[in-house]
Image (tube, helix red, strand yellow):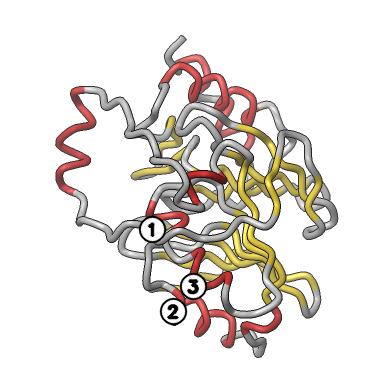
Amino acid sequence: METIEITPNLRMLRFEVGQAYLWRDGDELTLVDTGPAGSGPGIAAAIREPGMGRHRLRRVVLTHFHEDHAGSAAEIGAWGDVEVMAHRLEAPVVRGEAPGPPPVLEDWERPIRDALPPLPPAPPARVDRELEDGDLIGFGGGAVVVATPGHTDGSLAVHLPAHGVLFTGDTVAHMEGQVMLGVFNLDRARAASSFRRLAGLDVRTACFGHGDPIVEGAAERMRAVVRDLPA
């Protein structure tokens, strides 16, 4: 796992597949996504780098149930006083109470999917708070939940208006310098509609589930590709 500082209070944790983000408010930490199963030790080490400890982690926000995002939620949720959050529609899948529907792959997506390394399934994890569109979460000066159905039914993004930061989950990707609609969607048209909604937000910095963050001018970069999205 690689740790990359984006801003003084924001770090990206990059795994072999996907990434998570660590946000710092004073002596409290918030983790957006958890990486694949088994990522706990690497995340704990990343927390120690700025002189903190895992007891400072107050909450985990899952953007969706896929194994590269929720794989270590069970492990990290057992660290102590950690509140695990997911959208209401994702919560049964995260808990292991319902199967997660597979994506509907475009023909051109199949070789991309086949080339990825296999990941272990995400162990069932508790969800302490079920989120809805517009809910507020107590970090980053008031984080706003933005429902982004399409990649999965209960995908969500997290917007920090006070900082101009957006965590997009897998609705938006940034690959080889190109901002694009994320791949492997359950409903590509709904995902495109969610992309349009995110592009309309006042955002300076965007943090993606896949690809390097954009630190400045993220909203403009997303708006530039809206016209090319599927209807």
At label 3, which amino acid type do we have? Glu
Q: Quadrant of residue 182?
A: top left
Residue depicted at x 41% and y 72%: 39
In this view, 106 is above or below 201? above
Q: In the image, 60: left or right of 114?
A: right
Closer to us: 85 or 98: 98
For marks 2 and 3, give the one nearer the viewer.
Answer: 3
Name which of mark 2 and mark 3 comes first in the sequence.
2
User: Between marks 2 and 3, how big is the CA–CA gap?
Assistant: 12 Å
- Amino acid type, mark 2: Gly
Q: Residue at x 63, y 60 (%)?
A: 84
Image position, residue 183 (x, y; %): 35, 34
Q: Is residue 20 left or right of residue 182?
A: right
- Disc nearest the viewer among 2 and 1: 1
User: Is 172 situated left or right of 137 in this image?
Assistant: left
Residue that badge 3 annotates: 75
Q: Position of residue 72 (x, y in %)?
A: 45, 66
Question: What residue lies at 62% left-to-right and 42% top-to-bottom?
Answer: 87
Q: Earlier in the sequence, mark 2 or mark 1?
A: 2
Under tag 1, what secondary structure? loop
* 94 or 110: nearer the viewer: 94
Q: Dot 1, how many residues are within 10 Å of its Cα: few (below 14), some (14-19), or many (20+)?
A: many
Q: Residue at x 77, y 50 (%)?
A: 143
User: Does 168 sit above or below residue 201?
Assistant: below
Report crowding for label 3: few under 14, some 14 to 19, many 20 or more residues within 10 A (C-alpha).
Answer: some
| Residue 11: x %, y % from top left | 58, 68
Question: Is residue 40 depicted above or below 145 in this figure?
Answer: below
